[in-house]
Amino acid sequence: MITADQLKDVTERVEALRHYLNIEQKQVEFEEEQLRTQAPDFWDDPQRAQEQMKKVKGIEKWLKGYEQARQQAEELQLAVEFFHEDMVTEAEVDADYAKALATIEDLELKNMLRQQEDPMDAVMKINSGAGGTESQDWAQMLMRMYMRWCESKGYKVTISNLQEGDEAGIKSVTMEIEGGEYAYGFLKSENGVHRLVRVSPFNAQGKRMTSFASVFVSPLVDDTIEVFVDPARVSWDTFRSSGAGGQNVNKVESGVRLRYQYQDPDTGEEEEILIENTETRDQPKNRAKAMLLLKSQLYDRAMKKRLEAQAKIEAGKKKIEWGSQIRSYVFDDRRVKDHRTGYQTNDVDAVMDGKLDGFIKAYLMEFPVTDDDNQ
């Protein structure tokens, strides 16, 4: 049976959400934005109309989420009163408490995702580090871990490029994660180097080995995001795809390789961005997807420059180092620890099966985005 303090905590957190989410102001905004959709010429510009509808639905989701939390808190209060009158069981009260708490925590977590790119879909690339088969096996384990997390959240995962390892595992994989809200906002916490310590099954002496794999996550842009690509800096190659896909996949040059000569707008330094796509047997579709992935990378670079500029200005905040070692997975000691937040768990098997919410929430709480960050 829940305590009086637990009931009070639920009530206070719902009231805090009303304040943090500025529900009254959102209600006014919702009504104003909805009125714009009723204009006679609203659908004359379909793209603009869709953007407006997306904006209206975005505000509405916050209002519905808060209303659900408020109603569940009231139902919990009633359930406690009914329990004292022997009208409901202790188990029913506990069930109502768990339901209200889950709704509140979900809303609190989403409230931490205020950057423009947070609601977007994501592109994740995993690269094995030095170390041959052991590192390649580790990269494949990470791929499975993230696919299981996506599955639990209802996201769709599409593998746009996969390079298999020499003996086992993978050298690299690029995955597009779509179909749900805040894919990038949640997965941005995974950017960096992931370290594995275990007794390697590929080592004849049974020695404890350390392996590394890097994870890069960027927002997946869509047609509503404008990103400039200089056509003069683009070149294409085609090649025969390898791996699964039947005989035809090896006979037709459906794989595409895009090379883009990127120039840093601040330093003038040049760097080649290389993107390969073998997602389908249709070369034009692969070219279109490769261009989309290029735009996502360019958008990501511009976004990170903005974050770096904010980090320099905000002296009191911890700086997030992109590409630094972020987490260690020590199998023998049954421990997974995030070095940025200090969050850790002994349930290694659950983590490798995609239970990452604890790490994600700890990261978002450690590096919150304030309203000032968006100005």
Image (spheres, helix red, strand yellow):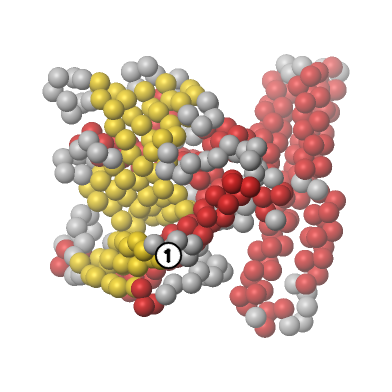
Res. 300 visible in picture: yes
Using the image as rendered, state which of residue 80 and residue 245 is in the foreground: 245
Residue at 21% x, 20% y: name it.
207
In the image, residue 277 lies at what x, y percent? 31, 62
Mark 1 highlights which residue?
Answer: 268
Q: Secondary structure at mark 1?
A: loop
Image: 232 above or below 212: below
Counting every numbered tag in the picture gives 1
Image: 115 above or below 272: above
Q: Describe residue 50's horizontal placement relative to residue 222 as left or right.
A: right
Using the image as rendered, state which of residue 283 and residue 128 is in the foreground: 128
Q: Describe residue 247's horizontal placement relative to residue 264 as left or right.
A: left
In the image, residue 290 lies at what x, y percent? 36, 66
In the image, residue 16 lies at what x, y percent? 80, 37
Using the image as rendered, state which of residue 361 and residue 216 is in the foreground: 216
Image: 52 above or below 323: below
Residue at 60% x, 34% y: name it.
366
Which amino acid, mark 1? Gly
Using the image as rendered, state which of residue 274 and residue 154 is in the foreground: 274
Q: Judge the density around disc 1: few (<14), some (14-19), many (≥20) Cα neighbours within 10 Å.
A: few
Q: Residue furthest front?
A: 267
Res. 110 visible in picture: no
In the image, residue 110 lies at what x, y percent? 64, 44
Q: Quadrant of the C terminus?
A: bottom right
Q: Describe residue 342's horizontal placement relative to residue 238 as left or right.
A: right
Residue at 38% x, 27% y: name it.
329
Residue at 73% x, 16% y: name it.
1
